[in-house]
Image: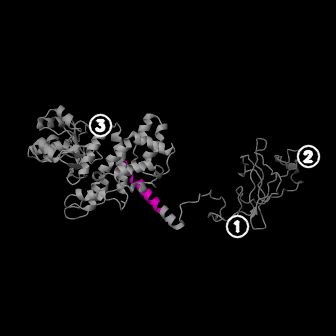
Amino acid sequence: MAPLRGELTLSFLNRLAARYHLGLRDLLAAITETDGRQNVAGMLHPDSEIHLNAQARERVCALSRVPAAVLEGALPAWTRAEPHAHYPGGPAGRLTRGEEAVAPWGPACPACCAARTGRRVPARRYLTTGERVCARHWYWLLFLPGTSGLPVPLGRCPEGIEAQRRHARLLRRSPAGAQAFEVARAITGSWWDQPWPNEEHLWLARLEATRPAGADAGWWKVAARDLITYPETVVLARLLADRTVQERTVTESRRHLPYRLGELPGLLAEFADQLGRPWLTHHLATVTHGPLFTWAHSCVRAPTAPAPATQKTLWAVHSAHRPRPLSDLLPRAPAADGTPPAAEPARRLRGHSLQAERAFTQGLAHARAYYKEHRHLAVPKEDTPPTIRWASGSPTPAHATPACPPTKPPPSPRCTRGGTRPGARCGSAPGTKPAITPKPTARSSRPAASPPPATASANGSTCSAPATPPSTPNNNASSPRSASMPRRRPPPDPDDATSRPAPKKPSPAPAPTPPHTAAWPP
């Protein structure tokens, strides 16, 4: 049995099982059997793909009677991975699921598949962006997660067939056609997610013309996103890839980065005319973000950048601008007994972060609440919190200021041994030079005496007086050194202890006040 070009490996095995009148699970058990045990990892779903090791591939070649070289040329995933077996020493396979695990795929055209195989058995193929439409039989090959795909007839939507022909012509003539189509798909996807204007009638007509019988309108609007926007996507891709349009955009911007799309009226007028929507110019004039605005920015900056970097930034699509995968948007079908499906845990999808989206939604809600209350978004910049605090430990109100504002400290950052910064203290006379307490040296190893107790000012605040060096019997008033640096007191003479009066005990010093901070009463 010959395979289809670009067919999924599991789709080929499904058709092979139908030829032998077997179920797919029975055929997988025969291909991967090791000592009576099935050696397949993963769960089997309608949208799954399988990777086989060398021994399992040999069994498939024997059952299908097709050479390995033919299968390798027709099946893209035939030798893509070499899965590890649960039970070593035999054939093995690994099942993967979804569009995120394998390349984009879709259902094969039923008429083409029947003409090629002689049987009406559904098949699935890997599809590129230009192969979603079967121009011969007028089918749109729609990917649906959790199913084997849905071929949608385009008899009532002829613009899809014409768009496919223009798309194929663009891919042949423009080297950047495929990249421009991805940017255009992101643009139309962003328009699709926004509320549609009242002037939009084409998309509504296509939705009604292509909706299958019995399908829910809301479900079909989510599933048919790429189908409905396909004609506009092809038109935008042709305009974005046109070198003339790029040059006119640069000339119109005068090589200045635009703040909004309204600064490029020629570009918007060209888009509105080619898309057949004259009202589009007014709706896009205030846009300051999104994939189209990003492309315009990159287009203006392109002439000043090197060629490789230009092509990379011009056609780059940010992860936040990519269309969301259908597996995250489509609701899960209820069970057979009518039980609603259980909510799946939040997970990070390819190119998207649910945590970032929730944080953005929360920040947007806060911004709207602030604007509703203040009628603007000019949030004042927060200053550095004051160092003044209440005695109880609570922060000081913004309007509270110290009674004795500290003077500006000297530029020297050195601190004394007591932990205070040298400089003027609260209560010192203006215009006087503050006394600097020197750093203890080897000659003067003992620290200076504790500062005198703080005195209360007239307004109730306590301010510390400048520290003075302790007086000793050997102080020399005429020496300039004794005025600024304290000398070490000599040891007392035991013979003269009785004749000399006992030294006066110093009063206990209070806790040192932090520098440049006034102590407030509780």
Q: Residue at x 15, y 40 (%)?
A: 31
- Quadrant (top left, top right, bottom left, bottom right) of the C terminus: bottom right
Say whether disc 3 or disc 2 marks the residue closer to the N-terminus. Answer: 3
Dot 1: element: loop
> Is residue 207 in view?
yes
| Residue 405 falls within the magenta-colored stretch | no
Q: Given the image, on which type of amino acid does mark 3 rest?
A: Arg
Residue 69 located left or right of residue 248: left
Q: CA distance from mark 2 to mark 1?
A: 43 Å
Q: Given the image, on which type of amino acid does mark 1 rest?
A: Pro
Q: CA distance from mark 1 to mark 3?
A: 84 Å
Q: Residue at x 85, y 44 (%)?
A: 481
Q: With respect to residue 362, does 409 lie above or below?
A: above
Numbered circle sitting on residue 365: none
Q: Quadrant of residue 105?
A: top left
Say whether disc 1 or disc 3 marks the residue closer to the N-terminus. Answer: 3
Q: Which scheme is used to colour this image of the protein?
A: one colour
Disc 3 marks which residue?
172
Which percent across, then down, holds residue 403? 74, 64
Which percent across, then down, holds residue 86? 23, 42
Disc 2 marks which residue?
478
Q: Residue at x 83, y 53 (%)?
A: 432
